[in-house]
Image (cartoon, helix red, strand yellow):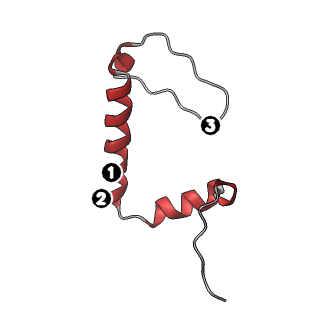
Amino acid sequence: MEKTISHSRSEESPEAKARWFQSLPLEERMELLCMFTDMILSANPDILEVKNVKPVAGRIRVLSKA
């Protein structure tokens, strides 16, 4: 069986994404974390100042500056 590459979002399961992420070395995982953090802060620099944030139902976690 020949492996193929798909560009269909419908074939991107959460499990497949988790396997891909877990296959990365720790250094690359941290680079991604920093990249996403920088992207979020550049889009909304005031996000660290938000007070009284409530969790959203589902798999999203609300982070706050300690």
Judge left or right: residue 37 versus residue 20.
left
Mark 1 surroundings within 10 Å by alpha-carbon count, few (fewer than 14), some (14 through 19), many (20 or more) = few
Above or below — where is 55 with respect to 34?
above
Q: Position of residue 65 (x, y in %)?
A: 35, 23
Disc ID at residue 3: none
The residue that appears at 35% across and 35% down in the rendered structure is 39
- Chain-order first, disc 1 or disc 3: 1
- Amino acid type at circle 2 is Glu
The residue that appears at 51% across and 63% down in the rendered structure is 20
- Amino acid type at circle 3 is Arg
Judge left or right: residue 32 versus residue 18.
left
Image quarter in which the C terminus is found = top left
As rendered, which of 12 and 63 lies closer to the eye? 12
Q: Which quadrant holds residue 18? A: bottom right
Q: Position of residue 17 (x, y in %)?
A: 56, 57
Residue corresponding to mark 1: 30
Q: Position of residue 46 (x, y in %)?
A: 35, 16
The residue that appears at 41% across and 23% down in the rendered structure is 64
In three-dimensional space, the C-alpha distance between marks 2 and 3, rounded to whole angstroms, equals 25 Å
Mark 2 surroundings within 10 Å by alpha-carbon count, few (fewer than 14), some (14 through 19), many (20 or more) = few
- Amino acid type at circle 1 is Met
- Marks 2 and 1: in contact by CB < 8 Å? yes
As rendered, which of 41 and 5 lies closer to the eye? 5
In three-dimensional space, the C-alpha distance between marks 1 and 2, rounded to whole angstroms, equals 5 Å
Tell me the element at label 2: helix
- Marks 3 and 1: in contact by CB < 8 Å? no
As rendered, which of 6 and 17 lies closer to the eye? 6
Above or below — where is 1 with respect to 29?
below
Residue corresponding to mark 2: 27
